[in-house]
Structures are given as C-alpha cells and as structure tokens.
Amino acid sequence: MRRLDQLLANLGYCSRREARDWVNAGRVTINGKIADDSGRKAEAASVLVDGEPLDHPDGLLLLMHKPIGLVCSHDEREGPNVYSLLPPRWRQRNPQVTSIGRLDKETSGLLLLTDQSALVHRLTSPKHKVPKVYRAQLDRETPADLAALFASGTLQLDGEKTSCSPAVLQMMSPLEAELTLTEGKYHQVRRMFATQGCTVTALHRFKFGSLELGDLPAGQWREMPLSHFDPA
Ligand code: URA
C-alpha cells in the first residue's frame, strides 16, 4: 500500500502537490470509489486515474534498438539521450528509468532499460557473466592469433586493474568480427581491438543474454515482462 500522492508522483503522473488537485478534481478512484484524500493509502491495482489503470505500477523493462547519436547518460550536458525516445510520463518516474549498462554514443543496438535497480545490478555485475554479443567493423585485418588472445583472459587494457575476462571472437570476414563479452569495461570492444592497432569503425550489439534485437527498427523499443530475468 502506498499513499496516492506518492504513487502518482513516483509513476510520473504529476508532482505530489498536483496529485492533491487531481484527487480534489475527482480524477482518481480506489476500488471504483472517488478518492477524497491524496494521503490515503491504496494498492496500486485498485487505483484508476481518469478511468484508466495505473501505468506499469510494478515496474518497467524495455528492450530498445539504440540508434547511433544518442547517449545513455541522463546528464543533458552529454547530449541527446535514449530516454528522449520514451513517453514523457516514463521519463518522470522515480525510481528513474535507466539503461542496464551503457552503449557509446557511436554504438547502436540492443539496450535494456528498467526502473528496477536490483535488475541493473544483477545484469551488469561481471559475476553473473551475462553474454553480450557485438558486431564490429574494423579498419584493418586482425592478427591470426587474436581469438586465442581474447579467449585467454590475460588481455590488459590501459588503466584497468583487472585483465579482460575470456571473450569469444569469431571473424565473419577479414574486416567483420563478432565478439562475445561477459563484462562491460569502458569502451571495451573498441579498446580490445585497439590493443592490436585496429580501429572499430562501426559497432552494433545484437544480443544480450538470451534476448536478441531481431528486426526491431533503430529508435524503437518493446516492452518485456519483468519476469524475463527472474532467477530460475
Ligand atoms: N564496447 C564499446 O567499445 N562500446 C560499447 O558501446 C559497448 C562495448
């Protein structure tokens, strides 16, 4: 049970102050009866606003095709962000909708977003070894033994305390690689290839755990059941 004003504010409808006005205007019902006090506690499932059930009161999990050019940071100073693609109400939620890990501004592909901080922690922790698969275009051919080096777990990136966990490299053509990582160090794919003098000219993530991007167009997202990542 939560206070009505808190519920509406946390789900991004309005401020707690405005919630009082919404209640006074008769816009909110609890179990079919017009609510008369914004401080009243209620189960989210029993509340309607303007006759409609509350918007995802139990949380959100979204699978987005991140386009190139948007950042995953909420800091507006870093430029246009992926959250600008979401409905305004979801951008006002508290806890905030945030990405599960990040993709660089210049990287496209599968990005998960949620307001469930426990899920963020679980899926970004290297301990859980969730595989993420990237397709990278390279500016030059890679050394023949690169797959063995990436798989070895010994590759050290500048400024990192720990070496890269074993990663699976598959060359699809001389300048196109698929790389599977189970961790997410800063700019990791680009930096791993850079250790060999190779520049990644395009980077796209198409798999995260068992989830695939499929043919979801860039800039679009679809909802996922929160239960998708429930521990078995
Ligand atoms: N590695 C990168 O270099 N960039 C990303 O966005 C993700 C992984």
Image (tube, rainbow, N blue to C red):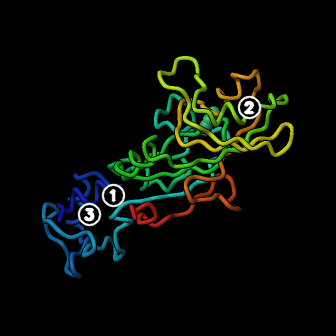
Q: Disc 2 beta carbon < 8 A from ligand 1?
A: no
Does ligand 1 reach within 8 Å of label 3's beta carbon?
Answer: no
What distance separates the C-alpha of mark 2 from that of mark 1? 48 Å
Q: Which amino acid does label 2 sit on?
A: Leu
User: Would you say the beta carbon of the disc 1 residue lies within 8 angstroms of ligand 1?
Assistant: no
* Left or right of 141 on screen, residue 134: left
Number of the label disc, if any, that sits on residue 11: 1
Q: From the image, which quarter does the C terminus lie in? A: bottom left
Q: Nearer the viewer, residue 197 or 156?
A: 156
Secondary structure found at label 3: helix
Q: Is residue 215 above or below residue 194?
A: below
Residue picked out by circle 2: 146
Q: State the separation of the CA atoms marked 3 and 2.
A: 62 Å
Numbered disc in front, either 3 or 1: 1
Decide: is 13 above or below 91.
Answer: below
Q: SS of the residue at dot 2? A: helix
x, y percent for residue 31:
21, 80
- Mark 3: few/some/many CA within 10 Å (<14, 14-19, 20+): many
Q: Quadrant of the image for the N terminus?
A: bottom left
Q: Position of residue 198 (x, y in %)?
A: 77, 25
- Residue in the image at 42% along x and 59% along y: 60
Under mark 1, the amino acid is Leu
| Residue type at tag 3 | Trp
* N-terminal label among 3 and 2: 3
N-term mark: 2 or 1: 1
* Residue at (67, 35) in percent of width and height: 106
